[in-house]
Amino acid sequence: MTQIKSLEAWFVTGSQSLYGEETLRQVGADSKIIAEHFDKSISVPVKIVYKPVLTSPGAISTLCAEANNNADCIGLITWMHTFSPAKMWISGLRSLNKPFVHLHTQFNRDIPWDKIDMDFMNLNQSAHGDREFGFIVSRLRIERKVIVGHWKDDEVLRQLGVWLRAAMAWHDFRHLKIARFGDNMREVAVTEGDKVEAQIKFGYSVHGFGVGDLVHFVNQVGDKEAETTLGEYKDKYEVERSVLQERKNELLAAVKIELGMRNFLIDGGFKAFTTCFEELHGLVQLPGLAVQHLMNQGYGFGAEGDWKTAALVRGLKVMGTGLSGGSSFMEDYTYHLEPGRNRVLGAHMLEVCPSLAIGKPRLEIHPLSIGGKGDPVRLVFHGETGPAINVSVIDLGNRFRMIVNEVEVVEAPDLPRLPVARILWMPRPDLNVAAGAWILAGGAHHTAFSKAVTTEHMEDFAAMAGLEMVVIDDHTSIGSFRKELRWNAAYYDRS
């Protein structure tokens, strides 16, 4: 995630030359103070760059063009300190290909009741300056987030931080490359999709490789390098002595797969990848430990060729940078249907990210009944409890849809015979409604799961991407959810 440190958002203030130089100097000074305050906030994940006050169509268009061409700019924070005639913004906004958030604030928090005069009123006109700006953005039918409140308020900073994290992920999507080792799991529908349309819609590209291309990199990993890495894992995880002694060759093979895969991804500039257990020619075991470690380093992953989920996991990783909690590839695996205690056990064959783990994961080796290869190495752990989200993106043919289910991770009982990482959760509002709504929406069995990212992050991201989004939470009922899907169909299917 080192490249994220260079990202920035531009603080852009609108006004007009009518007010004169003295007023405009004050507008600029006030705007700079706000930008600096945002830049110092722990809620703000990127650098905030102050930009000079905009007072003409030409200046606005020039700034938007500069933002489009700046590789580090993830978007704009727009604010109208005074009245800013919105026709000035039409050309610039129509050309802008970066997202922006509309900050509706004013420099002063309180009205100075005993001193207020017309000079003060002319300077502090956000109340109707932002309404003018809001009209033209709505007229241009541009999606955006509107944050209302004083710029020092914690809630304003929180909402801004959420939006900026979504913008980070959207920026990453526009440049993301996904490596696909092998193809889709044969005859599976939901993990397929239109990769060309995805690149048009989201910006990321999917590149297919034979497993032999990966094996070439794996075979280049030396024994000494693998031994060194394995030594690090001895301290990091719980490992039985018998495994270290009797099954060391299998451990070293898993480490070589991990290091070879990482080298392949670095060499090609890939930040996400997929594997498929049906295509393992040249690998001695299915990548388990490798996938878990690479996800923990920020890579996106999707099993069985699922490139849409690989991209989504990468997006959650970017959004959650620096936040507590983790994100991972996930699958709704099996249910506990005890009345009043319905639960979902989430897991996969091997590939759940240890960023979700509670306690020290165990490094284990067990047989796998599919894939036809040697016993794979994996990390086994329970998940940390608390609120989380489960997210799926599907291809409906004429559009992509995002489905989000809010869940509560709960403590799992001991599972002594289940040799995989696992998460146990209660879906909101309950299993019957959540599963029913998820299936009606076409949600996949593979998901991106996060304890760091929230529904609000995903709402902001979906707005930037122009992506249909439906949410399953405490307020969901099947009747209202069916209606929402029908309304969405009418909206997105229109010619």
Image: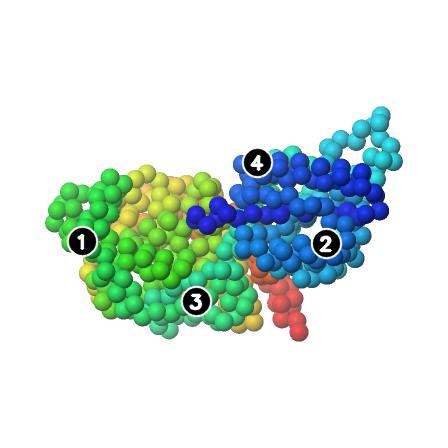
The residue lying at 46 percent from left, 42 percent from top is 322
- Corner quadrant of residue 412: top left
The residue lying at 65 percent from left, 66 percent from top is 491
- Corner quadrant of residue 135: bottom right
Calculate the distance from the C-alpha at mark 1 to the C-alpha at mark 4: 46 Å
Residue 228 seen by the camera = yes
The local secondary structure at tag 3 comes to: strand
Task: Give the labeled residue for mark 1.
Answer: 223
Tag in front: 2 or 3: 2
Q: At label 3, which amino acid type do we have? A: Val
Q: Residues at badges 1 and 2 in contact (C-beta under 8 Å)?
A: no
The residue lying at 77 percent from left, 53 percent from top is 56
Where is the C terminus found, in terms of image quarters? bottom right
The local secondary structure at tag 2 comes to: helix
Calculate the distance from the C-alpha at mark 2 to the C-alpha at mark 3: 38 Å
Calculate the distance from the C-alpha at mark 1 to the C-alpha at mark 3: 32 Å
Q: At label 2, which amino acid type do we have? A: Ala
Estimate how packed mark 3 is, as few (under 14), some (14 to 19) or many (20 or more) residues with alpha carbons within 10 Å.
many
Calculate the distance from the C-alpha at mark 3 to the C-alpha at mark 4: 37 Å
Tag in front: 2 or 4: 2
Task: Give the labeled residue for mark 3.
Answer: 206
The local secondary structure at tag 1 comes to: helix
Estimate how packed mark 4 is, as few (under 14), some (14 to 19) or many (20 or more) residues with alpha carbons within 10 Å.
few
Task: Give the labeled residue for mark 2.
Answer: 59
Q: Residues at badges 1 and 3 in contact (C-beta under 8 Å)?
A: no
Residue 341 seen by the camera = no
